[in-house]
Amino acid sequence: MVTLRQISDIQTLIDWRAEVIKNVFDVDADSSLIEANRQYYLKHVHDGTHIAVVASCDDVDCGCGGICLTEELPSPDNPSGRCAYLMNIYVREAFRNRGVAHKIVLSLVEEAKKHNCGKIYLETTADGKPVYSSLGFRDMADMMKYYDTKI
C-alpha cells in the first residue's frame, strides 16, 4: 500500500533532490552540482513556494515529488496567473511499476488546484521524454483528462 505525506523540512527536500540528481542523471555524489542545488534550496525555497510529498511503501520511503508555486502574467487561459511546475517525480527502482508515481502526481495536481493554479507545467524525464509519456499517457490532454476524472 502506498501512503503519502507532505514534507516541508528543507533538509529532507535537499536530500531527495540529491538522490534524484545522483540516480536519474548519473552524477557523482560528491559533485559540485549537488552542492549548488543545496545552496539554491537554502537560498530560494521559501515557505509557501514549494509543496513536496514523500511516498512510502511497506514503511519505506520509496518516492518523492514536488511542485513549485509561482505566478506568471495573466492570460486568457489562466486569468489569475497562478501556476505550478510539477517537478522531480522520482521513485526508487525497487518500487517502480506499483503506481507510486501516479499517486504522487495525483496528490501534487490536487495541491496545485487547492492553490488556484490555472496552469500546471511539467518537466521532462532524464531521457528527454515528457512526463506524461513516461507515465503511459498519449499526450498532455490524455493525462489531464485522466486526472480531472480522479480529483
Image: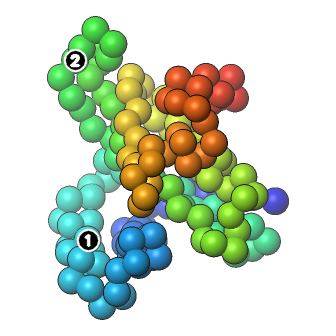
Asked if residue 54 shows in the view, the reply is yes
Residue at 34 percent of width and 87 percent of height: 28
| 115, 84: nearer the viewer | 84
Residue 27: image location, x then y, percent: 35, 80
Residue at the bottom extreme? 30
User: How far across and down, in percent of the image, does residue 120 sit?
Assistant: 41, 33
Residue 26: percent from the left, percent from the top? 40, 78
Image height of 109 relative to 98, above or below? above
* Marker disc for residue 74: 2
The residue under label 2 is which amino acid type? Pro
Decide: is 28 above or below 117.
below
Mark 1 is surrounded, within 10 Å at the Cα level, by few (under 14), some (14 to 19) or many (20 or more) other residues, namely some
Residue situated in front as seen by the camera: 3 or 131: 131
**What amino acid does circle 1 point to?**
Asn
Q: Is residue 94 left or right of residue 50?
A: right
Q: Mark 1 and mark 2: span between their CA atoms?
A: 30 Å
| Rendered image coloring scheme | rainbow
| Residue at which label 1 appears | 37
Picture disc at residue 90:
none
Eyeballing the image, is 109 above or below 7? above
Q: Residue at x 70, y 68 (%)?
A: 95
Q: In the picture, which quadrant includes the N terminus?
A: bottom right
Q: Residue extending furthest top?
A: 76
Badge 2, how many Cα within 10 Å: few under 14, some, many 20+? few
Q: Secondary structure under badge 2?
A: loop
Marks 2 and 1: in contact by CB < 8 Å? Answer: no
Q: Does residue 94 sit above or below 106 in this rendering?
A: below
Q: Quadrant of the C terminus?
A: top right
> Which picture quadrant has residue 127?
bottom left
Give the SS element for disc 1: helix
- Residue at the location (38% across, 47% down)? 123
Of residues 28 and 84, the one drawn nearer to the viewer in this rendering: 28
